[in-house]
Image: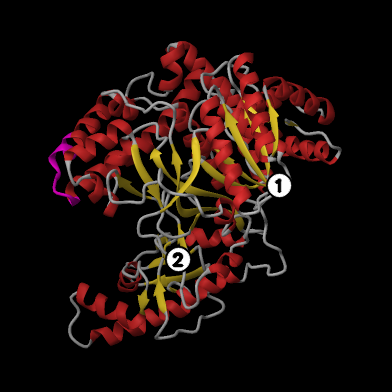
Amino acid sequence: MSAEHPCEVSPSDRYRGFADFIRLPLGENQELVYSPLTRAARVLAPFQVRLLLGCSTSATLPEHATRLAHALNQGPGQAEMIQVQLAALARAGFLVSEHSLTERCRRRSDSQTPPARISSVGVPTRNRTGSLEKCVHSYVDNCRRHGRAVDFVVVDDSDTPAVRAENRQMLQALRVRTGAEISYAGPEDKVAYAELLMRRADLPAEAVRFALLNDENCPNATGTSRNALLLHTTGDVLLQVDDDTVCNLAYAPGAKDGLVFTAQHDPTEFWFFPDGMPDPDEAEGPEDVLAIHEQLLAKDLGACFDFLPACVRPDLSQVSGGFFRRFEAADPCVLATATGVAGDSGMDSSVYLLSLDGESRARLMRSEDVYRDALIHHQFLRSVRQPTLGDGTYCMAFNLGLDNRKLLPPFMPVQRNQDGVFSALLRSCFTGGFFGVLPWAVLHRPPTRRRVSTDHLRVSVTRPTSGQVFQALVRGLTTGPNTCDAESTMQALGRALTELASMPSTGFEEFIRLHLWNQMSRQASHWDNQLRKFAGQPVFWAYEVKQLQAAMRDELPSPDYAVPSDLSATLGVEKARLLLQRLVLKLGLLLQAWPTIVEAARDLRANGVRLAHPI
């Protein structure tokens, strides 16, 4: 589809334009307009540009023309003239039909590729023997009921040998009772495997140890266990689950068949207890959790259409032109999938809840009691209503499917939100890598119920966490033209991070502050728009938002703003400042070495050597 190959125009098809047009003034009110999606370029007059910008949603050309004639105060009978103009824009490639977009997706299907099956379930754990037992048993039981032969792998970072021994004994007893294949890796296994990788592939010790070991003694190192699972299961399609989840699945309220394509950062909706939703505690979990992921996981984009009911069209209303440009990658496919969550949301901060819109916002704001309870306890159901494919960066790894037959990015080895950094890397480095979200919620119930501090909202907007810093750096560092080669792009990003971390501390922190300021400025502007849109209602929400905007104005100019709060809380500002720069350097080294690390793990597995060992 291009300007050189005019498009046929159908009066019954639905057309839309995309907001990512490039517009360059050429004098005398003329503009050179370029569509990155279709590569169409034309010099357009102001009226044509207004028509183009007015077609941001899908409709037939007659429907667009009637609406635009009214919106532009055109006289009666002008709709026909506008329709002629719109047809010309469609033929030129500026308005794109839903049919052509759907065909663009379907053309990427390889019908000869057999469907992938999940063969491994991995669980990272630390100091939670009781929760771990409930978790593994629930997934073993689900797989047995559905005749699924799956390898279970537990990577244990518990603090003491006594707890690790208790975990192994529990897993041995579970294997005897159920017959499940269970492998286990503790800290000693990760150390031995890291040394083996370094000897076999002559890999840099700092990168390998950062991937798998917590040499910096950070308070949270779940990402090292997630990376261990990636290396142990290389070549498999994998499901990673948190050790405090249970395989009780609730169908999302109002869920339905279909397929939604989205360019939104976060396509999920929120329901707040009680909402008359299915109770995940009472769910019997009859559904095959692996089959739920396999609806989308490891499929090329065209094959995802295969499970659509007859006569159901995919929803393309939430996509951008850039979304479809990603289809030009050599192998566009679904690299990761996730279900929603019911119970503890796992969110670090409640700030995101203040920015909700649509039905999620209405459910949150229906009373101050519901609002306060959600902000304090973070207990709710979060999911999509339809199977959804996106290229955004929302990811929470409670129940995460991964196509580990292909190269995937590593998880950020240390600190919280390692799954958010993973998805930012997937978005930035893997042009053809898409993320699927499924309309189910898995039960998440940590051993203790969370209650956040009264000042956590202010801290969240005035002091970033290390996870937020790493995501901002991944999104903000330019690596040059995207080559569609994930390995090269990942390594280029790694070099950019190491160069940044090698700068003097003043320049390093300035770079981070500027990116974080831009992010927080967008947040403050979004709240301004919401305050106008909702006329400052409800009052309890508006008061909170204005207080947070004031806190931003007070605190963002601080010279310590770029020092992550989760590091400074335990180390103090100066030590946290130094640690952050080291962690950025190590992440850069890891990204450069990761493709070689993965290849070495494949070679070891081919020779019968794996990180975890059968119980």
Query: Which residue sits furthest front?
Result: 177
Q: Amino acid at mark 1?
A: Asp
Quarter-of-image position of residue 525: top left
Label ID, residue 236? 1
| Quadrant containing the C terminus in the rendered view | top right
Q: Residues within 10 Å of mark 2 (few under 14, many from 20)?
A: few
| Quadrant containing the N terminus in the rendered view | bottom right
Give the residue displayed 36% in from the left and 81% down from the top. 61
Give the residue displayed 71% in from the left and 63% down from the top. 114
Residue 339 placement (x, y as % from top left)? 48, 49
Task: Report the front residue among 389 and 232.
Answer: 232
- Is 368 located above or below residue 93 in the figure? above
Residue 34 placement (x, y as % from top left)? 47, 65
Q: Are marks 2 and 1 in contact (CB under 8 Å)?
A: no
Residue 9 placement (x, y as % from top left)? 45, 84
Task: Report the front residue among 502 and 462.
Answer: 462
Distance of label 2 from label 1 (alpha carbons): 28 Å
Is residue 552 shown to the viewer in this render?
Answer: yes
Task: Report the front residue among 260 and 525.
Answer: 260
Residue 137 placement (x, y as % from top left)? 58, 38
Q: Earlier in the sequence, mark 2 or mark 1?
A: 1
Q: Residues within 10 Å of mark 1 (few under 14, many from 20)?
A: some
Q: Amino acid at mark 2?
A: Asp
Task: Report the front residue among 373 and 6.
Answer: 373
Mark 2 lies on residue: 257
- Numbered range of the magenta stretch: 533-543
Which secondary structure lies at badge 1? loop
Is residue 496 shown to the viewer in this render?
Answer: no
